[in-house]
Amino acid sequence: MSTTTELLTRGAELFPGEVVTTAHVRHLDLPLQAGRLALITLDNGFDHTKPTTFGPGSLLKLNEALDQVEAEAAEGTIVGAAITGKPFIFAVGADLKGVELLKEHGDALAIGKGGHEVFKRIAALPVPTFAFYNGAAMGGGVEVGLHCDYRTVSAGVPAFSLPEVFLGLVPGWGGCSILPNLIGPAKAVKVIIENSMAQNKQLKGKDVFELGIADAIFEPADFLEQSLLWAARVLTGDVVVEREAIDRGKAWDDAVAWGRLVADAKVHGAAPAAYRALDIIARVKDENLQAGFDAEDAALADLIMGGELRSGIYAFNLVQRRAKRPVGAPDKSLARPVTKVGVVGAGLMASQLALLFARRLEVPVVLTDIDQERVDKGVGYVHAEIDKLLEKGRIGKDKSNRLKGLVSGSLDKAAAFGDADFVIEAVFEEMGVKQTVFADLENVVSPTCVLATNTSSLSVTEMASKLKHPERVVGFHFFNPVAILPLLEIVRGEKTDDASLATAFGVSKKLRKTSVLVKDAPAFVVNRILTRFMGEIQTIIDEGTPIATVEKGVEPLGLPMSPIVLLELVGPAIAQHVSETLHGAFPERFAVSENLGKVVKAGKRGFYTWVDGQQVLDPEVLELLSFGDTVLTEEQVLARALEAVAQEIGLMLEEGVVAEAQDIDLCMITGAGWPFHLGGITPYLDREGISERVNGKRFLAPGVASVPA
């Protein structure tokens, strides 16, 4: 057996559950009498809903196909070889389920080397090689094509990326080495670092062509036929592919330096993957691809055996799998149909909700408020947003007219909501106001209409307590901006029945939201954790630690924004209101900051202001505040803030606010933008030893979001 076969056979033994991708070889006579082509089609035997991946068994199959193609090329029976995928899918990279199983550094190294050895055989074939990117291509799927001499791409490709850095890996089967040498380091850094760290931003077929990754682009209807014709023209010399010269001087170094700035801005040195990728890009400036491949192998093995990747895979699985099957949700057969939606309120939040319901459910949506001016403003906002979608080409004229026709306003609640199946309130966050709204609604809606509240912190049970039918009330807490953040906390009150809850989950699914079932506890999940975190930060500032030190202290978390900037986004008044709510429930852990109260009273948006394009501490705000004389170091700031969070999460799990720690992480990732590379929050607290220090135990079992023992 060859070394490659030994490596992959060992890998296949470690991963017996792999869905193996077969590499089918067929032969085609090319147009223009160009000769006979061997076409390898990657196919795992399932339709496009189960994308093709590369595990060790799949690499073995490709290796076997290359044995055949290599022999045919040597015999002169073929003039070229090409690789394509099954309908809609080229290949989406390494099978992460197999990566999770690896326990030894040597095994991880073998997987990296095995992939390289197979893919290098494509580059070494004695005939010209082509990749026909016919559908989605990611990671190893992109890289197998990079080893070919020429590439075409379908204009219909919806997703093309090297997402490894996003997960905590590097493009380790040639991506870091070949791509900068193909399209230049600046473009490669954009694909490998910038796009990956921007929540795994995907390229479309047109982008792939414009970046120079593909040499030609064709429409999806006859993509394979046109690709074969183009390949024939290349082989006959009718088409000569010219690529831009690569600047291997200062421009290369500048591109790598820029990538480091991007990585620093995102993770502040706390996650190694981006930096390892950039080191490899820097290393292949002299075109020594083998040195790059060796560095990729080493980086893959190190990262596979590190906590960041396991946390990244854990987070990926939460968002891709757990999010689709909410734990504790009632049987979906209990859900009632929703043919009309009511929204109480016509302010910005209510208007965003109306737009979302209209777009996703495509049923009539009616807004109400206390006067016609407010109603008209809310409906006007929705119609204007629909016009923007039309202008951007996101929807057509007919769809635009239909959606605008679905959204209306009324001052008459009985007429507006009498035939509604689902009514959500988005009014002022005050219990008395919300109880009055629900009492009014109960008099006009049908007996089966679900009453939902978008409260961010108030008790759903108390809100429903004065109704004749409290069982129909459910918490339906969205996160701002509604169109972007996926999370929807669905809150079960003490008397909420299964039918109402199932209807809420059904609506959430149609809204394309990530739903998590939450117990009716103060501030639910995200706001409770963030308020504890922010409250501890605010207390540290009030006690005397400079704001700059506090900001620097939490940088290693790689949060999407600093706590002080987040305060400005949320708004000091809302932050104070939530902290007061939680102080009322848990006075020993949630303080109400006098300094924050002064900021609210002064009508200030936060601690910062802008001067000459620079963000600086607002001197007017600083004059309002009083500080103690306790000054912490950056390390002490981080430790104290995280210990507070660990304690709060431990208590929430004891209270049964959610089913498991995994739901906490799902909420924090999708509702608060908590970084993927941390795996949410609980894997990070486990990895840093904070969970055990505070609570005496880990949140997750060893091997969950960490390397198995």
Image (cartoon, rainbow, N blue to C red):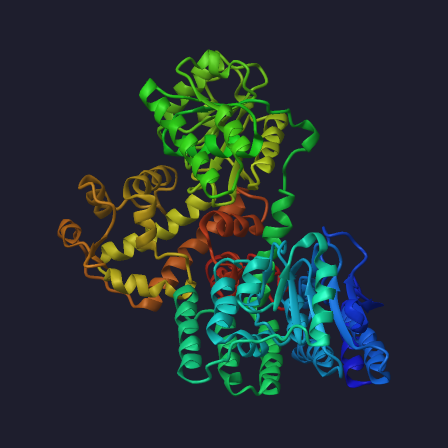
User: Against 72, is 52 above or below?
Assistant: above
Left/right placement of residue 60 relative to residue 211 reads right
User: Against 219, is 208 above or below?
Assistant: below
- 55 or 175: nearer the eye? 175
* Residue 13 in view here: no
- 545 or 258: nearer the eye? 258
* Residue 393 in view here: yes
- 549 or 609: nearer the eye? 609
Q: Residue at x 55, y 41 (%)?
A: 513
Residue 442, horizontal then vertical, whole percent: 49, 15
Q: Quadrant of residue 22?
A: bottom right
Residue 102, horizontal then vertical, whole percent: 69, 71
Residue 1, horizontal then vertical, whole percent: 85, 84
Left/right placement of residue 112 relative to residue 187 reads right
User: Against 107, is 364 above or below?
Assistant: above
User: Against 235, is 469 above or below?
Assistant: above
Q: Quadrant of residue 62?
A: bottom right
Q: Residue at x 47, y 39 (%)?
A: 389
Residue 292, horizontal then vertical, whole percent: 58, 83
Count the marks.
0
Q: Quadrant of the C terminus?
A: bottom right
